[in-house]
Amino acid sequence: MSRRMSSRTRTDHDHTDLSDESVVVIGGGFTGCITALRLAQAGHRVMLYETQSQLGGTLRDLDVDSSAGTRRFLRGCQYADVDAPWHTALTNLVAEHLDDVSHTMGSATRQGNSMHVAHDVAVPMLGGALPARARHVDTVSTDAVPVTLAERFAEYDAWSPWLTRYAERSGHAANVLSARAALGMQLSRVVAADIPSLDVLACKARSAWADAHLAVPRSARGNSPLRALVPRSGWSPFFDALHQHLVHEGVAVHTGVPLRVRGTDGQITVDAPALPSSAVYVWAGSPVPLHKAFRDAFPEADSPRLDNAAMPAVHVHADVEHWSGPVPHYVQWFDTESPLLRLYVYRMKDRVQACFECKGPLTHDAVQSLLHDVARQCMALGLAGTTSALRFTAVEVNALRLHHLQTARDVERLSQFAQQLAAWKPNAASSVRAMIDGAWLAYGREQKLREIKNALIERGLAVAW
């Protein structure tokens, strides 16, 4: 492994004599930062590597220069669980960047000429009779476990064609995407528009299928409003404070590092400045480079390249005028004719702002038309109070590719790869001693952290979780 120093590297601590129980965490996003913090608090020597110049990964805010100065916008709907175990590991100076708020959500679903609105739940709300399977106590799914999204949708009977049409807006056929993609697309459950919530709850109590496939608003279940941790002034200040907390706990933080992972002759090595000669490596970034390195190291292994499905998307960041609804508020937009996928309204200091996540590409005129139509529909649907002057004004429009849609084959490959990686034994002292994966899912941050914790414990490393 390379121990080169680089002028591009920022090092807050330089541990040179690291033991075999040292841990290198690759990836300075949320998962990597919390993993490094918990390991340091358990007494391990930890080095955290991030290729960008600052910690935070995709959660860092979007800063836009304007005539009025630099403006800050959140990169979509990102909040944290109030009860998350990692929250207790933060000092007051870090935690004070997060507010504990009532975080409301809902959905708007266009089905033909009707628009259904669901409160306290962000899944499709469809009219018509319940699927026949909902009436059977002992039926959880079809005879085979659904592998593709199309197989999952087939279980919904008359609702299946609508769900399929909506899913295909991603640019990938439903028979290609994995059933797991239902979670990322908010299609894992459906709210019945024509059935009272109490009747659906009774059905869920009788039927395992209904309990797994149907949803009702939180209020109908008697649950209190959803509490969430949201950044007071953006996620960037939170990660800057977390960076200092990591350093205080003894983590050697390296940012702006030209890091490269390579695989040759049964070895996986990582090239980056100031790496220890022997350590346990936790991979908390994108799984694609690690997957490629493993294929190169073991060309005979049955671990082919990933399809890595991506969706062309557009994020429209806007100012909001005369919003009288709750803040923050998240709306999942289910409309097969509209490019809008998600709308998130939040407060940044003294401003109310919004992020529109849309299916791309979009022209300038299409963006303006979308903002006008959504304002009109929000008022008509009661999502923004009774004001008649609601207005969204675009400040920044970003084209991007979202990689949260995995094909059915990719899910199988990643699962197989994770097993191969766990069983891998390096055949040379210069190779990485142990590699732990932690970035396979685009969603489920808490699940990633749990999987990393369990893998570390299995390797005999204490974790302060």
Image (cartoon, rainbow, N blue to C red):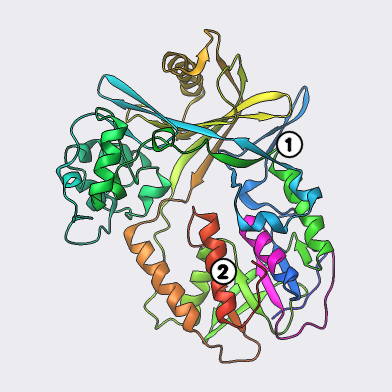
The three-letter code of the residue at mark 2 reads: Ile
Foreground of the two, 21 or 58:
21
Q: Position of residue 359 (x, y in %)?
A: 43, 35
- The numbered dot on residue 85 is none
Residue 27 horizontal side relative to residue 340, left or right: right
Q: Which mark is on residue 233?
A: 1
Q: Callout 1: helix, strand or loop?
A: loop
Give residue 394's position: percent from left, percent from top.
59, 23
Relative to the observer, which residue lies in front, 47 or 363?
47
Q: Residue at x 47, y 29 (%)?
A: 362
- In the picture of the structure, the residue carrying the numbered disc 2 is 452
Q: Is residue 10 visible?
A: no
Report x, y in % for residue 88. 69, 56
Residue displayed at 14% across by 43% down: 132
Q: The magenta stretch spans which residues?
A: 12-38
Q: Quadrant of the C terminus?
A: bottom right
Q: Amino acid at mark 1?
A: Ser
Distance in Å between CA atoms under marks 1 and 2: 29 Å
Label 2 residue SS? helix
Q: Picture coordinates of residue 58 (x, y %)?
A: 61, 49
Is residue 456 in the magenta section? no
| Labels 1 and 2 touching (C-beta < 8 A) | no
- What residue sits 72% from the left and 84% below the top? 277
> Which quarter shows the N terminus?
bottom right
